[in-house]
Image (cartoon, rainbow, N blue to C red):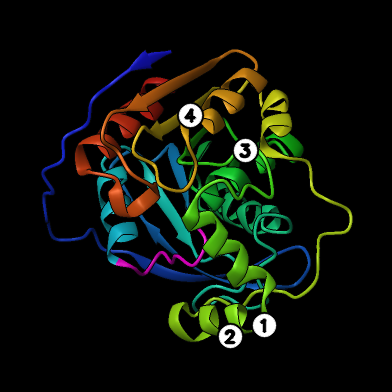
Amino acid sequence: MRRASSEHKLVFMPFAPNFPVMLRTEDGIRIDAAHTPSARTDLGIVVAHGFTGSWRERPARRIVHVLSGYGGVIAFDFRGHGRSGGESTVGDQEILDVEAAVRHARVVGYSKIAVVGFSMGAAVGVRHAGLRGGVDAVVAVSGPARWYYRGTKPMRQVHWAIEQPFGRWAARVAKRTRIARGRWDPIPMPPHEAAALISPAPLLIVHGDADAFFPLEHAHQLYAGAREPKELWIEPGYGHAETAATPALIRRIGKWISSNFS
């Protein structure tokens, strides 16, 4: 484990060109995605956004642009988000969405695949790698270690949006996020248990000490649950997920991914 610092100066730059694609999951959900090629043609990086996010939003596009300097990038919208079909199950069936993106990365010719997930996308990326496999590295940024966490005000608000009819309506109208009704049955394996199943693929856990959604205990629980090879970066001053991620931090993540396949 190492403690690292990140730059907080945002650098705005033209975005790398991307090519929209439409994917189809094993259970028939249409997934809106985009492929951003890279000079490095053997490495594909799948980017999984957080809850209510989208690959079309500026923070995610900035992340894709930076990561495309290290490999080709497949970014997508989870089910129930943006232009994708279906309804969000908030981390359960979303592993099928990641599987569709990974499968597409293989089809277009990438021999090595890394998944980089943010918040909900981090939980899904860890669960996908543990339960489905087929990836060569995983990066979990600002991810939860367990379900039903309500220890912070933002997470209590998230649960309200998921559980209450008016909350689901607000998420649909304000964030273009359609949330499935009802409770999980059965409850999916939590990320900290799935993390134990990722090895021998390397796992990088990145978490900020200023995260307003999930405190550092989540990062430590994920790290404790995982087997080697694993690494934990605690980022001073870093908040939560895509919106707080600086280009400097994303470059370091890109370098970490690239170093595992050099």
Q: Nearer the viewer, mark 4 or mark 1?
A: 1
Task: Work out how far the residue at label 4 is from the one at label 2, CA to CA, in angstroms.
Answer: 33 Å
Q: Secondary structure at mark 4?
A: strand
Q: Using residue 62 as the reference point, say whether residue 117 is left or right of it.
A: right
Q: Earlier in the sequence, mark 2 or mark 3?
A: 3
Q: Nearer the viewer, mark 4 or mark 2?
A: 2
Residue 94, x across and y down, in percent: 67, 58
Amino acid type at circle 3 is Val
**Cβ–Cβ under 8 Å for marks 2 and 3:** no
> As displayed, is residue 133 above or below residue 36?
above
**Cβ–Cβ under 8 Å for marks 4 and 2:** no
| Residue bearing mark 1 | 165
Amino acid type at circle 2 is Trp
Amino acid type at circle 1 is Pro
Pointer 1 local density, CA inside 10 Å: few below 14, some 14–19, many at least 20: few
Q: Secondary structure at mark 1?
A: helix
> As displayed, is residue 97 above or below residue 141?
below
Residue 37, x across and y down, in percent: 34, 53
> How many dots with numbers?
4
**Cβ–Cβ under 8 Å for marks 3 and 1:** no
Residue 246, x across and y down, in percent: 23, 43
| Residue bearing mark 4 | 205
In the rendered image, the quadrant that contains the N terminus is top left
**Cβ–Cβ under 8 Å for marks 1 and 2:** yes
Q: Nearer the viewer, mark 3 or mark 1?
A: 1
Would residue 49 be seen by someone viewing this image from the given angle?
Answer: no
| Residue bearing mark 3 | 126
Task: Work out how far the residue at label 4 is from the one at label 3, CA to CA, in angstroms.
Answer: 10 Å
